[in-house]
Amino acid sequence: ANVVHCGVDVEAIEKYKAEHDVIQVKKELGIPLDHKVISIVGIVSEIKGQVHFAKAAVNLLNSSTDKKLTFLIVGSKNDAYANNIQNIIDSAGFSQNIKLILVATDVFKYFNISDICVNSSFTESFCIANLEAMAFKKPLMITNVCGNPEQNIHNETGILYPLDNMEAEIEKNL
């Protein structure tokens, strides 16, 4: 017998994509139409490593002449970890380019407007967000931990990167 670890409703995703215009959603979220969108979707918590994604985003924006990048961190709660991430964003002066978004029930819109999806987890059994990103046909950049390598073929369907020096790995591969 085969076991399906987790599944996504691909038909629902295809229907969503057909019914929702990327340009309209970007306008609704205040994202410039010419920006590349790099997102990370999932509950914001230390084990998920979003602080490293935020620091990499700050470093990329600081070092690049091209500021046409928007980074979305979707799944924030009002807690100390999220506040720390917001402080990193605010103190760097990039609140227009890096957006911390509260827990959302309509995550499809974030996948739909993304150009690249990132997973920065320190541990991950079998991540549904990775599957959803793939169903939206988005390239993945995910940590090489636990179940992630089962979901992503390195340099074919995306990039697997090691936990060591995560921020540099994200910067190097974006």
Image: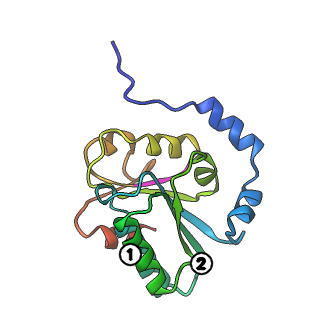
The x, y position of residue 173, in whole percent, is 41, 67
Which residue is at 52% across, 42% downward?
Answer: 132
The x, y position of residue 19, in whole percent, is 77, 42
Q: What amino acid is labelled 2 in the image? A: Gln
Quick one: 21 or 73, which is closer to the camera? 73
Q: How crowded is mark 2: few (under 14 residues within 10 Å), some or many (20 or more)?
A: some
Which residue is at 58% across, 64% downward?
Answer: 37
Cα distance, mark 1 to mark 2? 15 Å
SS label for mark 2:
loop
Q: In which quarter of the image is the N terminus?
A: top left
> Which label's residue is closer to the chain start, 1 or 2?
1
The correct choice, above or below, for 73 with respect to 149 in the image is below
Which residue is at 50% across, 84% downward?
Answer: 64
The correct choice, above or below, for 92 with respect to 143 in the image is below
Q: Which residue, given by chain and number where applicable, does mark 1 sit on? A: 55
Can see residue 171?
no
Can see residue 165?
yes
Name the quadrant containing residue 97.
Answer: bottom right
Magenta stretch prevailing secondary structure: loop
The correct choice, above or below, for 107 with respect to 61 in the image is above
SS label for mark 1:
helix
Which residue is at 40% across, 67% downward?
Answer: 53
Residue range of the region highlighted in magenta in the rendering: 137-141
64 left or right of 87?
right
Q: Which residue, given by chain and number where applicable, does mark 2 sit on? A: 96
Q: What amino acid is labelled 1 in the image? A: Lys
146 left or right of 57?
left
